[in-house]
Image (cartoon, grey):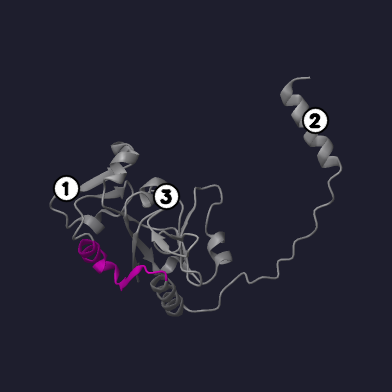
């Protein structure tokens, strides 16, 4: 018997003695009951509590808002599928670092040397203030939203749910999901808050209606 066969046989033996899996109660809330404006209000409150910057604008004002937020950035990353209108104002194309598709993937060193990143989002949970990225073309791969120190994320109001079960139904579970609740922050044993350890130190969210 090969090592592989031995391991699989041991697993089968263990499963024979396993108790039956009990039915899991699904009595938790599956759907929210708030209208769109109330969901936006709650999301803004949660994000501001997490020390994220939040701006609510019409779709036509997204480019100008992005431009203002990038005023101090020497360079910034955009994923291959980002809406080009959001950066159409840019006259100095050397500031833009493209990632993905025909441009290839930026290295970790290149990402670390970049000041900011702009992404879209897949779905956002208002009650927890959690933005979820799923690696779609307008969001790019996970690394670009974790390494630059400033993340600008555009959230469409139609993609805001009240609670997590609603959000999960909109997602494909096999995709690489990244859940973001405010800027990266942690505390040491003395409860000293440290920002930027596991992701961007600064998060700015543009909610477009």
Give the numbered dot on residue 136. 3
Name the one closer to the observer, 89 or 14.
14
Mark 3 to mark 1 CA distance (whole Å): 24 Å
Q: Please tell me whether residue 59 is drawn above or below residue 33 in the rendered image.
A: above
Q: Nearer the viewer, mark 3 or mark 2?
A: 2
Mark 3 to mark 2 CA distance (whole Å): 40 Å
Question: Where does the image place residue 184, in percent across and percent down from the top left?
Answer: 41, 59
Do callouts 2 and 1 mark residues in contact (Cβ within 8 Å)? no
For mark 3, does the 10 Å Cα neighbourhood hold few (<14), some (14 to 19), or many (20 or more) residues? some
Q: Nearer the viewer, mark 2 or mark 1?
A: 2
- Residue 69: quarter of image: bottom left
Give the numbered dot on residue 9. 2
Judge whether residue 98 can be spotted in this image.
Answer: yes
Question: Where does the image place residue 36, in percent across and percent down from the top left?
Answer: 44, 76
Marked residue nearer the N-terminal end (2 or 1) = 2
Q: Which residues are magenta?
A: 50-69
Marked residue nearer the N-terminal end (3 or 1) = 1
Q: Please tell me whether residue 127 is drawn above or below residue 77 in the rendered image.
A: below
Give the numbered dot on residue 46. none
- Residue 122: quarter of image: bottom left
Marked residue nearer the N-terminal end (3 or 2) = 2
């Amino acid at each position: 018997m090969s090592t592989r066969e031995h391991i699989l046989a041991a697993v089968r033996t263990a499963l024979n003695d396993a108790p039956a899996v009990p039915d899991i109660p699904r009595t938790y809330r599956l759907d929210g009951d708030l209208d769109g404006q109330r969901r936006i209000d709650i999301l803004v409150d949660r994000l501001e509590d997490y020390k994220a910057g939040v701006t609510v604008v019409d779709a036509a004002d997204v480019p100008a808002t992005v431009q203002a937020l990038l005023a101090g950035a020497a360079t910034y990353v955009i994923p291959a599928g980002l809406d080009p209108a959001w950066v159409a104002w840019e006259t100095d194309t050397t500031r833009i670092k493209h990632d993905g598709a025909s441009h290839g993937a930026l290295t970790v060193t290149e990402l670390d040397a970049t000041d900011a990143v702009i992404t879209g989002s897949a779905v956002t949970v208002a009650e927890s203030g959690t933005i979820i990225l799923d690696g779609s073309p307008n969001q790019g791969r996970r690394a670009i939203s974790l390494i630059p120190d400033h993340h600008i994320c555009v959230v469409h109001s139609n993609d805001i749910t009240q609670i997590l079960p609603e959000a999960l139904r909109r997602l494909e579970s096999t995709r690489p999901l990244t859940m973001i609740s405010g800027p990266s922050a942690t505390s040491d044993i003395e409860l000293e808050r440290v920002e930027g350890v596991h992701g961007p130190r600064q998060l700015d969210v543009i909610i477009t209606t």
